[in-house]
Structure formats: structure tokens, C-alpha cells
Image: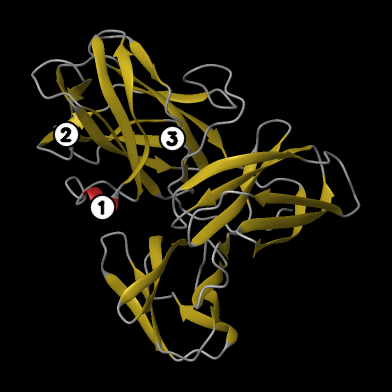
Amino acid sequence: MLHIKKLLIINIAILIGLASYGQCLSTNGLTTFYADNNGQAGQQFDVVALVDVEICLMDVNLYAGTHQYQISTKAGTHVGFESTPGAWTLIGGPIPITGNGVGVATPIPLPINLTILAGNTGSIYFTCDRTASFGGNRYTNGIAVGNVLTANADIQILDGTGKAWNFGTNYRPRSFNGTLYYDRINVLPVELLDFNGENIKNENHLWWNTASEINAESFIVQRSKDGSYYENITTIQAAGNSNTIQNYNYIDESPNEGINYYRLKQVDENGDKDYSKIIAVNKEGVQDFMINNLYPNPASDDLIIDLFSKSEDPLKICIIDITGKPVLEKYITPKEGISKMKFDLSSLNAGFYSIRLYNDRKIMQNLQFVKQ
């Protein structure tokens, strides 16, 4: 089985193989309704995963007319972060979208690619540049923020918050009118042996190999600036079926300045997908301090961190919950090279957490993991 380091990560990329607007590689979808009685520039709402899923696209109940729309996402609930732009990642837009009118679906051509592991929550903020009393997003007055609006065996959509443009006034509770399209994430029959990278002459060289493959379709290479928000940068065809070692490589000729985070999205022939561990490559060379890897992810009682350091300067490692509150801290004087450290997570509740690496009170890295 593929050795997976699944993260609750908020990701965006150009969705490969779209058949049409409003559909993922599969045709899974959950519709609320199109029975609006209110409207504003946009809204924020939570999605709870009952199985591992990737929210791909959406269609929405919009006024007729054209406005500039955009989508942001975040890990965990939107509650408490309704007016905190820094807690959200803008993943698409603004782009002009013309609404089909009230009571019908308007497909939104902005890939969401929001990965949520079973038992966890992610949130979506869809909004437009409406400044007058017309145009924008139509929704329904809800029961209570966090109320389960609708659900199936895979996901729940919760009542959320109406929003004036941009991170403006809250109107609550409000119910999303539309459809979320998603894929289920499955562990795939590919045995990934290794995934590594190195910067050579301002290009990031990536390589990986597999011990065996069954019905493997492709590897989508994804890149991130911060270890949370990812974009697709290329697709590499897989061997398909093999019981011998297969070697793959890719050269990122235009990496971002500084640290680039990479992961592989492995896609099966039937559309199932899963993710590799995350690696970090620095365009300027080796980072002075860097968490190379954290595992297992999701974690139960213990989280192991592989830390690279070029010196013995003191560092602080801090675990942050979804509200931004530090829950565990460790001050260390690392040795040169790779150090392994263990965090005892037994006192933490299940959920989504960030782990931050500090040097002289400056955040050097911010990665995410899930506590089961």
C-alpha cells in the first residue's frame, strides 16, 4: 500500500481532466437547495468529512448579472475567523462570473481542491465585489451556525455566515444554496519507496520511485510556498502495472524564492487518489533550520519530527490548535545535521493542528498535521 502522510491541508490547483464545469474526476456531489430568501456579497460555511474527501468544485445560487468572484478556504471551522483575512488562503479569483439567475445553479469555474480527512472540518468563503443592494450570492436564512444543513455518507454541509464584501459585516445564520462536488480519497495499490528533491543551479530537481504499481494512472506534482496551499505544476504518467522498481523525476525550472514544498498526488485509473509525504527544497540552497518531515500523519499518541539544522543556535517548536492557541512548546538546542524529536500528543483532543518552528521569535516554518 502507498505509504501516506496525509495532511489536513487546504489546497488549490488546476483540476486535471475536468469533463465540464461543476464536476470532479468522479461525479460525487451534495446539493443543499435553491430556495433562497436572502442574499449578500458572499458567505462562509463549514464542511465536515465523514470519509477522506477532496472538495473539487461548486455551483452556487446567484443573482443575474456579472461580478468579480473569488474563493478562499481554511482548515477547521470558519467560526471565530469570519473577519480575519490572515486565517484564510485565497485560492482562486477574482474572476468575472455571470449569474444564471435566482433559483438555478451557476457553475463556478474555480477549482477548490480542499482536502479534508474523515472526522475533520474545512471551511469555504465564496464572495464577490458586490457593493450595492443587488447582485452576488443568494442563500437562505438558516437555523443556527454549525447546524447540519444536509449530509450524505461522505460529507456534511453546515449552516454558516453571510458576509458583506470583503470580510465585512456578518449575517447569521445563513444556509449555502448550491452543490459541492468532491472525490473520495482512497489508499491506492502503489508502494512508494522514496521521494526527494535538491536545488541545482536555481532549479529544483525532484525524484521518486515505486516498488510496485497496480492500475496507477499518474503522479501529479504539487508545489506550495507555505506547506498548506498547493498548486499542480505537472502530471507524470505512471507505469500502470508493475512489480519492479520504477524511477521518476521532474525538474521545476521556475521554483518560488526560498523554500518550496512538494508532494505527489497519485491518481489511479478509476480516479481514486492519495498523497505522498511532503518534502522541502530551498531555491537558494539548504535552509539553516528546517523540519524535513513529520510523521505519522494523522498521528495518535506521538508525533515524530525530523529537524535539519546547520548550527546549534536555539530554536522553539510550538504546536498550535485551530483557534491559534499554543498547546505544546519545546525549546531545543539542535545538533548539526538531522535530529529526531518526539512530541507526546496524548493530552490533545482529536483535530487539526499546526506545528511552527521559530528562530529568534520569527516563524521559520508552519506545517499542519492531524491528531486522531
In the rendered image of this protein, does residue 320 appear above or below residue 336?
above
Q: Is residue 92 visible?
A: yes
Mark 1–mark 2 Cα distance, whole angstroms, equals 16 Å
Q: Which mark is residue 86?
A: 1
Indicate which disc, 1 or 2, sits on the residue closer to the N terminus.
1
Q: Identity of the amino acid at label 1?
A: Gly
Q: SS class of the residue under badge 2?
A: strand
Badge 3, how many Cα within 10 Å: few under 14, some, many 20+?
many
Q: SS class of the residue under badge 1?
A: helix
Mark 3–mark 2 Cα distance, whole angstroms, equals 19 Å
Badge 2, how many Cα within 10 Å: few under 14, some, many 20+?
many
> Going 51% across and 68% down the picture, which residue do you hit?
300
In the rendered image of this protein, does residue 161 appear above or below residue 18?
below
In the rendered image of this protein, does residue 178 appear above or below residue 235?
above
> Going 65% across and 37% down the picture, which residue do you hit?
272
Q: Is residue 105 left or right of residue 249?
A: left
Which of the 4 image quarters holds residue 157? top left
Indicate which disc, 3 or 1, sits on the residue closer to the N terminus.
1
Location of residue 104 in the rendering, given as x and y in whole percent from the top left corner: 32, 9
- The residue singled out by tag 3 in the image is 112
Indicate which disc, 3 or 2, sits on the residue closer to the N terminus.
3
Callout 1–callout 2 Cβ contact below 8 Å: no
- The residue singled out by tag 2 in the image is 163
Which of the 4 image quarters holds residue 57? top left
Q: SS class of the residue under badge 3?
A: loop
Callout 3–callout 2 Cβ contact below 8 Å: no
Q: Which mark is residue 212?
A: none
Location of residue 96 in the rendering, given as x and y in whole percent from the top left corner: 32, 20
Q: Is residue 271 left or right of residue 166?
A: right
Mark 3–mark 1 Cα distance, whole angstroms, equals 18 Å
Q: Is residue 143 visible?
A: no
> Going 57% across and 49% down the picture, which residue do you hit?
254
